[in-house]
Image (spheres, rainbow, N blue to C red):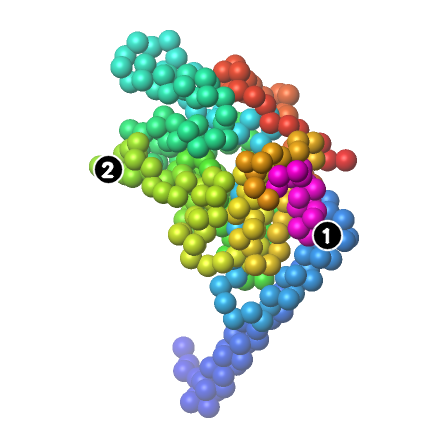
Amino acid sequence: MKRLSPFLGRLFLISIIVISAISCNKTPQFKNIEGWSPEINSRLKAFLDSTVNLNERKVAVFDGDGTVFGQVPFYLADEALYRYADLNYKGKTDSLSVSKMRILEAMVADGNNVGKPYVEDRVHFLSGMAPEEVAELGYQCFLESYKNKFYPEMKALIENLKEYGFEVWILTASPEYLYQKFIATELNLPVINIVGVKSVIVDGKLTNEIVMPIPQDDGKANTIPTYIKARPLIVGGNSRGDMDMINQSKGLKIVVNPDDITVRGQDDGPMHGFTVKSYWEKEGALIVTCNDVRDTTKRFHTAEWKIRENVAHPKK
């Protein structure tokens, strides 16, 4: 094989450098998101274009259930646990089975599956299992009951964010290992960018010891500086529990399928007197809709444990 002359070698090297420079400096191209109005697409494009020359970490943070994928009729975290209990512990009398069933019975008695005690009990139920085992538990539940529940509009938005050089993070009040594998796989994100309720690992097993902050309510807002360590330009959520997190955005706020029926009470702070939708309309957030309805062909173990169903959001 002939070697290039010194002159041709230098010319080849310069060409590679120039091509690389052009490639690195190419202008991002916004891809229209099918299913959302021209007005929403226009607002998204204008905001993303405004970030092109920012000399800082560009971070976008989203809630999980109800924001990037459907939560109807039940949260995947609940379905994964009740399904696992039915298959592995129900009707057994050994000490492990009895103790795990007691945890679920306490969760059912609590009834508030968005409250911190309930969220903590999910972690307690999974204690003693290997992280890989929990990740597979969540992934198999996803494949069986939630495979088509990721919102195509949100997936398209996330692809646009990657095009514009954003780091995309998902914050969830569900156990971290339970959600990491299926979300990272479906959205093509690094596993470490899916942050949930963490527990201390000892000798390769999850324990009952929860690592603070818990990403629920105000804890979601505190999770951002604790683990992400940058104030986001975009934050998206869907519920009252995401309010504190969404208000951490220094740029665009996105709200998916917000409730417009329940008027929030005094315990809801600045949302007092508003529905979730009317509050975010007042705050100038970008409100979007995605289809979230029950798949009637699927069996949901959660229903058999009589946990309340989440409200459907059929897209008109």
Q: CA distance from mark 1 to mark 2?
A: 47 Å
Q: Residue furthest front?
A: 266
Q: Is residue 240 visible?
A: yes
Q: Element type at marker 2?
A: strand
Name the spot of residue 302 as percent of width and height, x first.
Answer: 51, 20
- The residue sitting at the left extreme is 203
- The quarter of the picture where residue 270 lies is top right
Q: Residues within 10 Å of mark 2 (few under 14, many from 20)?
A: few
The first of marks 1 and 2 along the sequence is: 1
Q: Secondary structure at mark 1?
A: helix
Q: In the figure, is residue 200 to the left or right of 149?
A: left
Q: Residue at x 73, y 52 (%)?
A: 40
Q: Is residue 150 visible?
A: no
Kindly identify which numbered label has been placed on residue 183. none
Report if residue 34 lies within the magenta region.
no
The residue located at (62%, 20%) in the rendering is 297
Residue at the image point whose x is 22% and y is 37% from the top = 203
**Circle 2 is placed at which residue position?**
202
Q: Position of residue 174 (x, y in %)?
A: 45, 35
Mark 1, residues whose alpha carbon is within 10 Å: few (<14), some, or many (≥20)? Answer: some
Q: Amino acid at mark 2?
A: Val
Q: Which residues are magenta?
A: 271-288
Q: Residue at x 43, y 24 (%)?
A: 81
Q: Amino acid at mark 1?
A: Ile
Of 257 and 160, which appears nearest the observer? 257
Camera-side residue of 309 and 274: 274
Give the image location of residue 126, x and y in percent.
Answer: 35, 28
Query: Is residue 12 shown above or below 255?
Result: below
Q: Is residue 120 above or below residue 269?
A: above
- The residue carrying mark 1 is 40
